[in-house]
Image (tube, helix red, strand yellow):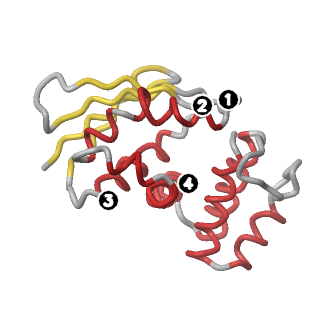
């Protein structure tokens, strides 16, 4: 997993819960990296799992809620760092529809070794509804939902988000603008 995920996660923890909490969860986790991350480095996925689980335990907040919070935070940080991606979209569904075909394509240029989830998108019923299928063995569906919610916030939109498990490594998000 790319280091930017770790640096942004720890940044969110520090902003929301303080540096002492960052120090606590790093010390509680068995991290081969010792919690030292660079944005361009690559680290085992198990390290983010350990950090999130320890934060959950410290705060008594569900892991899924923390991952969604992180996804929202990550969207806003990425939108600041890469405003061109967001500027090109007229609305959140247009942006989400471009994740696989445009955004991930650009990410792969920057980080050829990045192991990204894949997405399939369709609008079978209306322009106000997007079917977005997430595929990943890492099971970061809650981060994906948080990213979706962050995009909705960015565009000052509201939507219903329905999730349906497809198989062990895939989940369907049905996003309907309200």
Label 3 neighbour load within 10 Å: few <14, some 14-19, many 20+: some
- Marks 3 and 2, the one that precedes in the sequence: 2
Quote the CA–CA distance across marks 3 and 4. 24 Å
Q: Given this view, does label 3 or label 2 mark the residue nearer the observer?
A: 2
Q: Nearer the viewer, residue 104 or 117?
A: 104
* Gap in angstroms between the C-alphas marked 1 and 4: 30 Å
Q: Which residue is mark 3?
A: 154
Can you identify the residue that label 2 sits on?
A: 108
Secondary structure beneath dot 3 equals: helix
The N terminus, quarter of image = top right
Answer whether residue 71 is visible to the viewer in this image. no
User: Which is closer to the viewer, label 1 or label 4?
Assistant: 1
Q: Nearer the viewer, mark 3 or mark 4?
A: 3
Q: Residue at x 46, y 24 (%)?
A: 170
Secondary structure category for the residue under label 1: loop
For the residue labelled by badge 4, is the local secondary structure a helix, a strand or a loop?
helix
- Write down the residue under mark 1: 112
Residue under label 4: 63
Are the two marked residues, 2 and 1, in contact with CB atoms closer than 8 angstroms? yes
Residue visible at 86% across and 51% down in the picture: 33
Residue 102, given in percent of the width and then of the height, sits at 43, 31
- Whether 174 is drawn above or below 31: the answer is above
Q: Which mark is residue 124?
A: none
């Amino acid at each position: 997993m790319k280091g930017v995920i770790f640096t942004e996660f720890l940044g969110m923890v520090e902003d929301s819960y303080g540096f002492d909490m960052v120090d606590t969860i790093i010390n509680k986790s068995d991290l081969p990296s010792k919690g030292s991350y660079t944005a361009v480095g690559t680290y085992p996925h198990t390290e983010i799992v350990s950090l999130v689980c320890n934060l959950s335990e410290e705060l008594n907040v569900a892991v899924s809620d923390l991952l969604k919070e992180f996804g929202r935070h990550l969207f806003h940080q990425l939108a600041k760092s890469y405003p061109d991606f967001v500027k090109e979209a007229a609305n959140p569904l247009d942006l989400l529809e471009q994740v696989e075909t445009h955004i991930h394509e650009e990410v792969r240029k920057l980080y050829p070794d990045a192991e990204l989830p894949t997405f399939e998108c369709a609008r079978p019923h209306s322009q106000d509804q997007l079917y977005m299928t997430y595929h990943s063995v890492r099971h970061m569906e809650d981060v994906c939902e948080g990213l979706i919610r962050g995009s909705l916030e960015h565009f000052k939109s509201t939507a219903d988000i329905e999730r349906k498990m497809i198989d062990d490594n895939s989940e369907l998000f049905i996003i309907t603008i309200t």
